[in-house]
Image (tube, grey):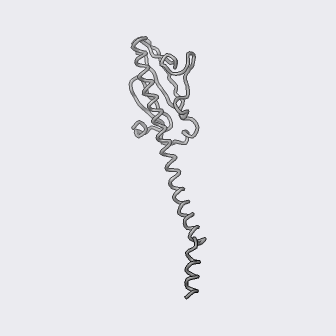
Amino acid sequence: MSKWIALRKRSSAGFTLVELMVVVVIASVLMAIAIPSYIDKVRKSRRTEAKTTLLDIAGREERFFNTSNTYSSLPSDLGYGAVGAIFPMTVGSGYYTVNVVSAPAAGAVPASYTITATPLGDQLKDAQCLLFQLTSLGVQSSTPDTTDCWK
């Protein structure tokens, strides 16, 4: 009887190497699935910053147009950056640069602008929505051309 108690105490003392390796394999598989998915979600959340900035600049351009009867391509005119700063400029957390190209009115053609957000750094790996554009006509586009990017 004492042998049975001794064996029982010894077997409940810890984990075997096989049990430990099974746990390591399961954890590795879960991490191999979870980490890339997490990184994709982080990149997708950074797109919001670019879209919000484009819409904000468009609103500022329209206010500037109401007072000046022209669009501006200087960040300081729109309340971005210091006086003398020029586009393109990095905005927000530094994952996108924004560029504004404005065309003055010529004859019967009204003034217009195109705002573009270009990714930087790790955001370049976001193959689903690389580049965002917004025009003075309100046309929203992205590269590659997908409707999901502006949702």
- Quadrant where the N terminus sits is bottom right
Q: Residue at x 43, y 19 (%)?
A: 61
Q: Position of residue 89 (x, y in %)?
A: 55, 26
Q: Position of residue 121 (x, y in %)?
A: 58, 37
x, y percentage for residue 122?
57, 40
Is 82 above or below relative to 10? above
Answer with left or right where residue 74 lies relative to residue 109. right
Work out whether residue 123 or residue 1 is closer to the camera in this orientation and state it: 1
Please determine whether, in this image, residue 40 is positioned above or below residue 91: below
Write the residue at 50% across / 53% down: 34
Residue at the front extreme of this rendering: 2
Left or right of 112, for residue 8:
right
How many marks do you count on the picture? Answer: 0
Q: Residue 59: where, in percent of width, then height? A: 41, 22
Where, by quadrant of the figure, is residue 113 drawn? top left
Question: What residue is shown at x 49% (from left), y 38% (from top)?
Answer: 46
Residue 11 lies, with reference to residue 99, above or below; the image says below
Residue under the image location 41 percent in, 11 percent down? 67
Furthest residue to the right? 17
Residue located farthest toward the bottom when viewing the structure as drawn: 1
**On the rendered image, what quadrant is the C terminus found in?**
top left
Q: Quadrant of residue 149?
A: top left
